[in-house]
């Protein structure tokens, strides 16, 4: 039995295109969700997975309708296979009922993982190059070194309250206590 799953991210979007495509390939049951792909709770998908039995095929219009990430997608298809179920994606023409379909799915997964690794390597190389040029990432410091040293000095002088010191330096309490802790660990 073919069981369809369709998902849109926003209520303003329409499921009709996906539902029509799933009906055309013979899905007898179609489950739907209106939720972001990153949403952990997708009741329509949960019902579809509960309904599936060994020998059934879960059909989606496109891969991104099912998985929120590559690892999630691979885990879902692997779980289906371990329970004797199959998977089909119409747009990517992946059908794991055949050996070729399984191969194509794993090639897609491997290529996506390879692309992720390349992006990760380029990001690390870019950060290393920036550090070598003296750039450092992150949020800029609120106070320069002179004013950062003034915060603990004013605190230890006990003439002003923490609130007054924060107002004077134009910083919040959390930032003040961070500078105080840094001065105590470095001094």
Image (cartoon, rainbow, N blue to C red):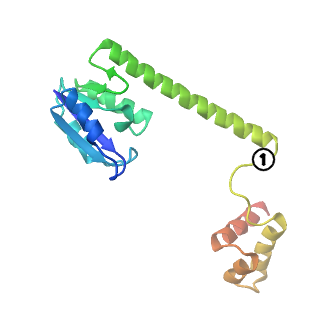
Q: What residue is rendered at 73% in x and 65% in y?
A: 142
Residue 41 relative to residue 166: left or right: left
Residue 107 to residue 178: above or below: above
Determine which residue is flagged by label 1. Answer: 135
In depth, the one of 13 and 145 nearer the eye is 13
Label 1: state its secondary structure.
Answer: loop
Q: What residue is rendered at 38% in x and 47% in y? A: 36
Q: How many marks?
A: 1
Q: Position of residue 182 (x, y in %)?
A: 73, 63
Question: Is residue 184 something one can see in this rendering?
Answer: yes
Quarter residue 21 falls in: top left
Residue 42 appears in view: no
Q: Quadrant of the N terminus?
A: top left
Q: Is residue 126 above or below residue 56?
A: below
On the rendered structure, is 50 left or right of 127?
A: left
Q: Quadrant of residue 156?
A: bottom right
Q: Foreground: 148 or 104?
A: 104
């Amino acid at each position: 039995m073919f069981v369809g799953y369709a998902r849109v991210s926003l209520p303003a979007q329409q499921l009709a295109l996906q539902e029509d495509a799933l009906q055309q390939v013979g899905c007898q049951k179609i489950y739907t969700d209106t939720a972001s792909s990153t949403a952990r709770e997708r009741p329509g998908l949960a019902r579809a997975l509960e309904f599936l039995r060994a020998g059934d095929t879960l059909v989606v219009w496109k891969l991104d309708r099912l998985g929120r990430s590559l690892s999630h997608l691979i885990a879902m298809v692997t779980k289906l296979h371990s329970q004797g179920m199959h998977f089909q994606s119409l747009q990517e023409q992946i059908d794991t009922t055949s050996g070729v379909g399984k191969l194509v799915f794993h090639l897609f997964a491997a290529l996506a993982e390879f692309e992720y690794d390349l992006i990760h390597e380029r990001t690390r190389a870019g950060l290393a190059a920036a550090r070598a040029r003296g750039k450092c990432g992150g949020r800029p410091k609120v106070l320069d070194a002179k004013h950062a040293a003034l915060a603990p000095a004013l605190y230890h002088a006990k003439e002003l309250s923490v609130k007054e010191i924060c107002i004077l330096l134009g910083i919040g309490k959390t930032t003040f206590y961070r500078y105080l802790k840094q001065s105590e660990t470095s001094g």
